[in-house]
Amino acid sequence: MAKNKLQKFADMTTFPHVFQYPFAVLQEKGFEMRGRWNELFFKNTHPIVLELGCGKGEYTVGLARCFPDKNFIGVDIKGARIWTGAKQALEEGLPNVAFLRTHIELLAQFFAAGEVAEIWITFPDPQMNKTNKRMTSARFMQLYSKIIVPQALIHLKTDSMFMFAYTQAMARVNCFPVVVESVDLYHDYPSDDRPFAPTQIQTFYEKQWRERGIDIKYLCFVMEPRETYIEPEIDIARDDYRSFGRSAVR
Ligand SMILES: C[S@@+](CC[C@H](N)C(=O)[O-])C[C@H]1O[C@@H](n2cnc3c(N)ncnc32)[C@H](O)[C@@H]1O
């Protein structure tokens, strides 16, 4: 393992706003802040917003700068990536940022019902061959339903027309009201005339997609916690390009 990576892992264990638990410890003791993030960590009653698959975490940090009255938690399984945003937030002294290193599938072990107000899903792998691994599939909606408030806002930013169309269909069949939808975000919502537009800050992957000339798609919808969700059954045209860090399109 690269020395740089080892140093980052060592740093992470000392960061007060980074939470990472071996699965065995979680199983045995549970997570003490579950249902009490605001009381024990943020020390306020502001809404909690998650960025799932936050990678290097710049978007979480950027959102935290834009919205001091919300609490942001970046979630990813890759510690060396999280390190970048975690270090930045620490150096800036941002009080409304934390990072959680875990599999997204385990979210309900870290958050109680009704604890999360908003979820950002930024540039996920579209998982064109594996519906269950897609981060806006019925399976993941069910996971989110265990932790969200009623009328939670879900934001998807993606390069993938496949992922965008699939998530649109998911919103439609489950009757989730759509707040904003755009297949060319930077054309439709320039960031100059509003207090906040999702174009004001970019994730690491987003910058690379834009450099490649790929339009950024954005969907924001309102989700209700429910027992089950309907999986959309439609044929969607597959993306015809290879993605950064993703397996080749088959
Ligand atoms: C394509 S990258 C996007 C990173 C970042 N959102 C960006 O736009 O720059 C996807 C990220 O999701 C994380 N990820 C994917 N599946 C995950 C899972 N089940 N649990 C936790 N993290 C996951 C990966 O580790 C990776 O950092």
Image (spheres, rainbow, N blue to C red):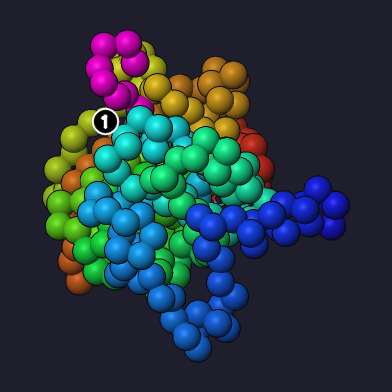
Residue 213 lies left or right of residue 13; in this view the side is: left
Compare residues 174 and 90 and report the one nearer the observer. Answer: 90
- Relative image position of residue 222 (x, y in whole percent): 19, 46
Q: Which residue appears at 25% of the width and 17% of the height?
A: 194
Q: For this rendering, which residue is in front, 123 or 2?
A: 2
Query: Which amino acid does the dot numbered 1 rest on?
Result: Glu
> Would residue 156 be seen by someone viewing this image from the given angle?
yes
Helix, strand or loop at label 1? It is strand
| Disc 1 crowd, CA 10 A, few/some/many (<14, 14-19, 20+) | some
Residue 122 x, y percent position in the rendering: 45, 41
**What's the residue at 85%, 52% (across, down)?**
3
Q: Confirm whether residue 158 shows in the render.
A: no
Furthest-top residue in this view: 192
Q: Main secondary structure of the magenta part?
A: loop
Compared across the picture, whether 80 is left or right of 93 comes to: right
Which residue does the image show at 23% across and 46% down from the upper left? Answer: 153
**For the magenta stretch, what is the residue range?**
191-198
